[in-house]
Amino acid sequence: MKTKVAIIGSGNIGTDLMIKILRTSNILEVGALVGIDPSSDGLARAKKMGVSTTADGIDGLVTMPEFNDTKILFDATSAGAHAYHDKVSREHGKTMIDMTPAAIGPYVVPVVNLDKLLDAPNINMVTCGGQATIPMVDAVKKVAHVHYAEIVASIASKSAGPGTRANIDEFTETTSRGIEAVGGAQLGKAIIVLNPADPPVMMRNTIYALSEDTETELIRNSVEEQVEKVQEYVPGYRLKQEVQFERIGDNTPIHIPGHGDFSGIKTSIFLEVEGAAHYLPNYAGNLDIMTSAALKTAERLVELRKDS
Amino acid sequence: MDTDPKRKLYIQDTTLRDGMHAIRHGYSLDQVRTIAKALDKAGVSAIEVTHGDGLCGTSFNYGFGTHTDLEWISAAAEVVENAKLTVLLLPGIGTIEDLKAAYNAGARSVRVATHCTEADISKQHIEWAREAGMDVACLLMLAHMNEPKPFAEQAKLMESYGANCIYVTDSAGALLVDGVVDRFKAMHDILDTKTQTGMHAHNNLGLGIAFNIAAIEQGASRIDGSLAGMGAGAGNAPLEVFVAVADRMGLNHGCDVFGLMDAAEDLVRPLQDRPVRVDRETLSIGYAGVYSSFLRHAENASKLYGIDTRDILVELGRRKMVGGQEDMIVDVALDLAKATQDSQEGAI
């Protein structure tokens, strides 16, 4: 029997996740898609696909017959709205997978720390940029201490919904913290750029990691292995260029104002994330990596609970 | 819009912000103090001091500064008596937290900059700054990449969030004079009469001063310029040149032209380790319509990967890269290097 879930938020992310579960999951089924705008495209799409809906937010969900045996809630709304959703979820003993940058619960990046955190009642998925880049920071950290890691995520304007746009600070702040807390960098920094080009540009991510000195071959192998692991749940995740290295000698260290001088190796990783085109077209790799990570997390959670 | 020919223009200096790009964000605190003091004495309305890419711009992607923004801002705040201390914030790079810290260090005006189609990512920052009592001007960057009418609609959004002034920001120095005029006309058609407008020029096609004059004729109130043109690409409209022209035109600018000339010549031009001028590379930026700040990064990538700087810039323009995507410069250089290698192998 499949485990029932409900998705709160009928925007780009919620709708993409719904379609992804319907098309790909042998473990989960969608009990309901929850919106606040009865005319939203996401709710219309759900009805067409035979999924129950409400346009009355989480309060509407709680009164639906599907809610009782729903085990997992996904929040695809905004950080501001998440606090209330979290409260209702806890009151009803559900597990919450939070795709907003609210970060009430611990951060999860599936290839890095999934199994460690599955007891938490609320799990946070960081950000799309975090899901794309933190695995790379972790890959470098596995072979050398990372003094500083910086990521630049560029996404197509069309793939950034109103929630993302109204709260862009939360992206940079949550991603930076995720780079440190999950990626293991001593200091993290995140930048996001929206590009309106038409046809829309594919999601791109660049990771710069400044680590202690080691064999570059070790870093390259670790990065390539990690890319393969992410590809297991995000098939469109790939290295766009060979990993680039630059040795920073002790006599010409990099000065990071406010933090000090650092030497070692600067690793530059150029990624492209092509989406699975479940809802928005394939340029929206940012949607795909977030919903794929959330789906993977939920499926693993169900598997582990069955075992125990 | 203000069409009174006797109106006092708001002269916004950018030497210590856009000028950062020209020297890879390398001002010392003493240089900031000396230049800010000279500008203040010469009567400019406002002095912008921040990393070239705005608050928190210090990074691998844009270049690490010699100092933090707060150190630079505090140094300027020590010496500025009359001019308004301004900072730049690009949503996606800097945050409200960074702006709060800048305010506490003495900044009283902020310029919130987005790409010319992405105004709605600036709402939270504009609202916070107005709430704090700051003056807010908004820069719609790479203005040549949006037609006048939709450009003005983006300006209207920023006005609705609380902006006091909206700038035509020709980040690529790629507009023509008509393009500047049309964007101001479109803004003045739909903006509230109380909302000011401003011009931020780059001189890549040699038109910086002409843009400022055209903007004033259309009713712009705020004009950007920097000493000796210190800025990204071929630089901004050189402030001392603009003020000399404005003087000859009988415009009310409130600045001491000789004071600005001396500061440009004695304090700023000697710092330019790469001349700030229209040359093959900076002209290519205007011609290809790419972000002026890409210049020094593209020159570095050219050296590192053996690809012509102009080829890199033109390809970045063809790919429609926008401000902030400096990471794509190396990406393009690697693609071009690979294409060169492949074609050589093909020839054998």
Image (cartoon, rainbow, N blue to C red):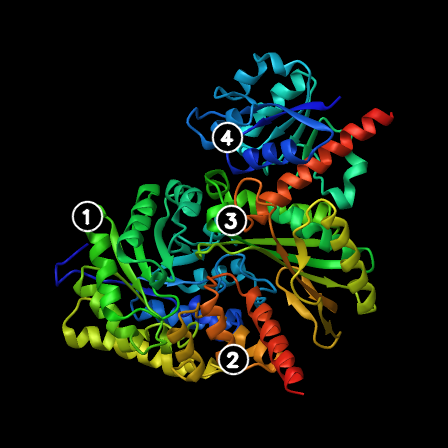
Q: Nearer the viewer, mark 1 or mark 2?
A: 2
Task: Specify whether disc 4 shares its chain with disc 1.
Answer: no
Viewer-nearest of labels 2 and 3?
A: 2
Q: Position of residue B67 (x, y in %)?
A: 57, 65
Q: CA distance from mark 2 to mark 3?
A: 33 Å
**What kind of residue is marked 2?**
Thr
Alpha carbon of mark 1 to alpha carbon of mark 2: how far? 44 Å
On screen, residue B261 above or below B5:
below
Q: Which mark is residue B126?
A: none
Residue at the image position 36 percent from the left and 61 percent from the top? B145
User: Left or right: B9 with respect to A74?
Assistant: left
Q: Secondary structure at mark 2?
A: helix
Q: Which residue is mark 3?
A: B95
Check contact, mark 2 vs mark 3: CB within 8 A: no
Residues at marks 4 and 1, CA–CA distance in whole angstroms: 44 Å
Parent chain of label 2: B
Find the distance from the CA under tag 3 to the CA under tag 1.
30 Å
Depth check, mark 4 against mark 2: the one in front is: 4
Q: Is residue A2 above or below residue B131?
A: above
* Residue at mark 3: chain: B
Q: Nearer the viewer, residue A181 or A85?
A: A85
Q: From this viewpoint, which residue is outermost toward the bottom? A: B348
Say what amino acid the circle numbered 1 marks: Thr
Residue situated furthest right in the rendering: A308
Residue situated in front as seen by the camera: A178 or B186: B186
The image quadrant of residue B10 is bottom left
Please, which chain is the residue tagged with disc 4 on?
A
Q: Amino acid at mark 3?
A: Thr
Mark 1 — on which chain does it sit? B
Q: Nearer the viewer, mark 3 or mark 4?
A: 4
